[in-house]
Amino acid sequence: MKTTVISVALSALSVGGAMAQQVVDVHCHNIMPDFTNSLDAHDAALDETFPLPEWNVESHLAFMDSAGIRISVLSMPAPQPYFGNADECRDIIRRYNEQTAAICREHPERFKFVAALPLPDVRLSIEEVAYAFDTLGAVGVKLATNSRGQYLGDAELEPLMQVLNKHKAVVIIHPHKPVPVNDNIIATAPLAVYEYPAETTRTIINLIARNVPARYPDIKWIVPHCGSFLPMAIPRMKAVLPVMVAKGLMQPVDFEANLARFYYDLAGAPSAEAIESMLTITTPDHIMYGSDYPYQPAAALVSGMHRLEQMLSNNRHLSQYKSLFLTENAVKIFNLQENEK
């Protein structure tokens, strides 16, 4: 009954355009009871400075129907459930992956998922990649910007990058609490306000500075939240790099090869200005829709979808890319089949 009420209420906000698009959502989360219980056991429920929202399959499907979303790609939320015991982390991650795979089997035309990995343990993470792809049917992996201080791009992750490259994996990146972090600042402005965009930018710069995407060209990286601060950071990095290289402080960077491997989702604040800014560092075939459900109320996300659709339809430059952003790019990157439409 509750699901029916939600569906009816949200349907009142729906309009034909979004429904007709049959959108693919590449940025949303499923929050399982076992995951939240593991956080509670370690007093870690507020590690990311705000509580995890409630989630269930029925409410998510109701939101999707109202927003015109055909398929959602589920990923595990922050924080990384590592509390000093690698085997415990592996077990928590394995339960999440298996439970999420079961949801996808029950709703194969609506849900796909990217597997979580038990980082910072690289060996266990490589084992989980094999299990997730070969047994569970994951369509990619989700990687935190950092796993308790181990940042993407760091040298200890090279064996994992080799495996992901062999699998031609899609990697969805999501910001986690930075390490270190200023507790006084985040007490005033929680992580989602500033630190998440900054953390994402910091991590991508680390990947680029080490030429990780260029060296592992078969990995496709999805950057969250409208590219965060990268449209400003990339030109600055290009400007200062020659001086840094000349002084022996940085290695040469192949910007073209690195940037070609990044894709971007529209979760957060996808204004026309934000999208135009993203197009200074990427191409229209590398931008996809993301809702960030359930971190905002479903009704707010449905309204946001309609604003985005209207903006794309009415913008002289961006209107030509509407179907790419909302559907086609994600269908291509995740190899979604015609029978899933």
Image: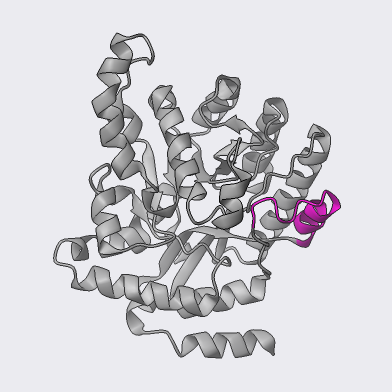
Q: Nearer the viewer, residue 57 or 310?
A: 310
- In the rendered structure, the answer to whether residue 11 lies left or right of residue 244 reads right
> Residue 323 appears at what percent x and percent y?
29, 64
Name which residue lies at 54% across and 90% down.
8
Residue 255 position within the rendered picture, expressed as x and y whole percent measured from the top left: 29, 28
Task: Quadrant for the N terminus, please.
Answer: bottom right
In the depicted structure, whether residue 101 falls above or below residue 87: below
Residue 103 against residue 57 in the figure, above or below: above
Identify the residue shown where x is 44% and y is 25%.
Answer: 212
Most distant residue in the right direction: 41
- 184 displayed left or right of 287: right
What colouring method underlies this structural image?
one colour
Q: Is residue 271 left or right of residue 150?
A: left
Q: Quadrant of the C terminus?
A: bottom left
Q: Nearer the viewer, residue 298 or 46?
A: 46
Q: Quadrant of residue 178?
A: top right
Q: Which residues are magenta?
A: 33-49
Q: Is residue 93 magenta?
A: no
Q: Measured from the top left, where is residue 102 in percent x and y?
A: 71, 58
Q: Residue at x 54, y 47 (%)?
A: 139
Q: Does residue 181 appear anywhere in the picture?
A: yes
Within the magenta stretch, is there residue 40? yes
> Residue placed farthest to the front in the image?
184
Question: Where does residue 156 sit, x and y in percent of width and height?
Answer: 60, 21
Quarter-wise, where is residue 3 in the image?
A: bottom right
Q: Residue at x 67, y 34 (%)?
A: 119
Q: Say if residue 138 shows up in the picture.
A: no
* Residue 279 appears left or right of 248: left
